[in-house]
Image: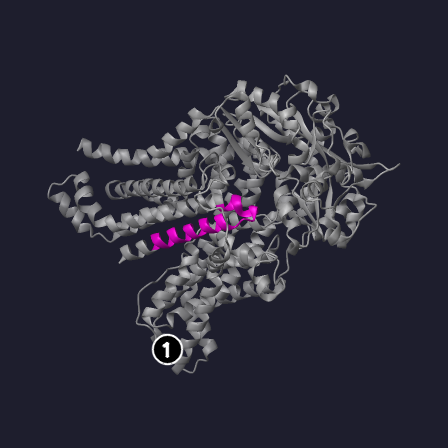
Amino acid sequence: MIMGRSWIALTVLQLITFLGLFYIVPLIEVIQISLSSGGWTEVIWGQLFITFLKFSFTQAILTTVFCLLIGIPTGYALTRLQPFAKKFLSVLILIPFLIPPMSILLGFVIIYEPNGLLAQLLGFQLIDVFGTLSGVVLAHTIYNISIVTRLIASNFESLDEGKITLAKSSGASPLMVWRYVYLPHILPSIYASILLVFLLSFNSFAVVLMIGNVKLQTLEVMIYSQSRVRLNYGLAAKIAIIQLLINVLVTIAFIRITKEPKYTGTYRDPPKVSKKLRILSTGWIFAVILFTWQSILATVYQLSRTSGRASIFDGNYSSLLGTSPLRVIENTLFFGVMTGLLATSLAISLLVQRLFMSGRTTSYVLGFISIMPMMSSSITLSLGLLLAYRSTSFFSDDIWIFIVASHILASLPFVTQTVLTGAKQVPTEYITLSQSLGATKLGTMRYVLLPLLAPSIIVAFLFGMAVSFGEFGATFFLVRGEWATISIGIQRLFATRSNFLPLQYSLILVLITLLSFSLVERLRK
Amino acid sequence: MALHSSSALQLNEGTQLTIYTYDSLLAYPGYDYIGNFSAYAGVPRDSINLVTFSDATEILTRSAVEKDSPQADVLIGLDNGLVHKARSEEILQPYVPSTIANIPQELINGLANDNLLTPYDYGVISLYYDKNRVGDLGNFTLSDLTDKQLANKLVLENPLLSSPGLGFLLWTNAELGSQSPEWNALWTNIRDNGRLVDSWGDAYNVFAAKESDRPIMVSYTSSPAFDKCLYNDSSTAALLTTGESGKVRGWEQIEGIGLVKNAQHKALAKQFIDWFIDSNVQDNIYLNQWMYPAMSGISIPACYNSSTYTPEDIIPYNSELTPQDITQNLDKWLNSWEELYVINTNTTPLPTWVFMFGLAIFVVVRKKYSE
């Protein structure tokens, strides 16, 4: 029994140590520095801050509106298809959201730069994306439509078609059917989309850093430039705190307004659809897929017609990358595997505590972990890590530890969710039965739960890995020496105009992501 | 994990010197300073760890982040715009090279009279342009850039991220006065019509690509010599503000090399600095770095004289904008610049109705839902 307790205590210790060292301490450090350096009114009324605050809100709201305007019809169209087509096309639609932002961004620039693919095709420049609001909103919309469509589509699926038939037979016009049947039904997923897209765009880093051209910055980019470029840590910490408060307030206000939307997902029979509507739906969906896949397609197209000397096996860019191009790929894989393993192990710790310990603390910790990424952005945490540990020898000699930690924090909500959802599907009787037959908690865990959970654990591992592959902000803030990742490599080589190596890198990232995703899909069955 | 730790360790053990600099140092057509120093000092080439950044500003910020446990031993490329931050961040240690007598006192005073940095080259920030694409601009002053057509052809570097960019800002400050009406008019026009990039290398890429249509860039008076000396191409020229009695005026950038405070390999680092400001390297500045060497007595190549200003033609503004002024005001100046550049930028090319429409839908839908 004592042994049983001590290993559970060990899992608690693991979780507390990790969150304490890499989340709480850095966050306290940021708060402390923001408070110790006075001058709050100067920040809040500072012209730059107000401008960037307004911009952060404007672009996030516009992105949300556009994503809904495209996402709602697409979600609707998706549910009008036959099961096989629906399944296939919804996977195609989701993929761009899983692709690392740097890859999407590279393709985006190839298309829209002044003499890019679009300008070559049209013969004139349709839209200027550098340093313009429309550029930022366009990039964010391309990235986020996928997830909105997915949320809305699965909400549409649960609609009882009987209601529609009833409404129609009672003489309701198509418009009225939309207003009184469809819209109320999909409201929960609309709310979920608004919150998700708003927060993702409000805290956006990579896109705005690369195409904002200084004129446009989100608060996230401003925190970065004030700390890492201007070395003005006090100001950066203050903005970080304000951004954190806004994130918390938006989240809370939203949960309040929507009165905790119930998300119903019961599967219904597919609706009966006329041939005309089905063709129309398919056409629309292909247009949306073309729109969201444009960056990936542009990358492949550009790579096919670029001949360059610099490949991943040659050393021309070593001093710019800080290491050999091949090592950059090794680093990416190393961070991915470490993140997958450690995040999964933390998630299992959490599961153990949930199963075998009293409920209140555990549910508190759980709640904390699920809202964590909404509260504190990756740049805020990186700033905290820098401020808290910059004078330690770990920070100078083993920066990889902090990069892995930041990747774990970014992936933890997804990884935890996957493991806990998996555990919910294990009947509680198995656990009770195993214990009543005299198995210890450790034994129950090892011989009953873990084998049943194996697929979820592998999925969680893959999720952790995928998040790590795509992570940009924290890595960009912290990285040095020989530890560059593929995303960092793309960013550093962006400006050299020899696109060959960045394109290769980008394609590798896309392929790795697709591979992990197809594994996840396979395991889910 | 074992693999990574061990390879990192091997790198650390084998390294005898780590240098931070920018990627274009002595790069065209190329003087191999690492190879030459390795032969001179008798250390293996592999033991010298060269880390390059896209601009000198990044050398400064990286070193500031690492200052509690520095990785670099020598920093090459911090200039008279960046030295103030380097001083307040305490990332360098004063060092008087054994070869200091090579360098004229006025350059030393212009960069750092406390010997935090030793000058290795200097140049005058100027506009560099392609006469075939814009015509001969002849008599020029900075205020000419308030012309929309001219600013439309300009590509420049961000003063927050780039040392030549900062040099250009200091030129405008010295000539027009920070935040004066003329300064505001100039920068507003550049903001609305110029193209701002992160580094000198980015700017050169934009300048060189004809389809970008930016045939004027912020560079150095010595840049036309590059085209003349290497390609016998006389189509480019440099622009400075025309002053009195045939002289021209601009901002002189002095680039320096310095020893990192608490460097791990001090002895070799000092030897490297001594060597860097001696004739081995200095003889190669004109035709590989395209700047003026800091060492006195090196004769200027003929292709320089025929293509651009010589240092004797130029009266720099540096005597009017002293290092003390810069130390005191630099942060303020950068803030003023950033505010002007960012605020009132037209950020609403999308009509407001799109935004209002979305809000209206939201409100209507919510109202219906709650009924």
**Subunit that carries the residue with mark 1:** A
Q: Residue at x 38, y 80 (%)?
A: A274
- The amino acid beneath tag 1 is Val
Segment tinted magenta in the rendering: A490-517
Is A240 or A289 nearer to us in this picture?
A: A289
Total count of labels:
1
Crowding at label 1, few (<14), some or many (≥20) Cα neighbours within 10 Å?
A: few
Q: Is residue A495 above or below residue A119?
A: above
Q: Which residue is mark 1?
A: A273
Quadrant containing the N terminus of chain A is top left
- In this view, B16 is above or below B307: above
Residue sticking out furthest to the left: A437
Query: Of residues A200 and B32, which is closer to you in this image?
Result: B32
Main secondary structure of the magenta stretch: helix
Residue sitting nearer the eye, A156 or B8: B8
Q: Is residue B371 visible in this depiction of the protein?
A: no
Q: Is residue A382 visible?
A: yes
Is residue A501 found inside the magenta-colored segment of the image?
A: yes
Residue A166, position in %: x, y? 37, 79
Q: Residue A483's spot in the image, x, y percent? A: 44, 37
Residue A125 x %, y %: 62, 62
> Which residue appears farthest toward the right when viewing the image?
B245
Could you tell me which secondary element the residue under label 1 belongs to? Answer: loop
Quarter of the image where one finds residue A227: top right
In the image, taking residue B142 as reference, residue B78 lies left or right, namely: left
| Image quadrant where residue B57 sits | top right
Q: Position of residue A107 (x, y in %)?
A: 50, 55
Left or right: where does residue A121 sit relative to residue A340? right
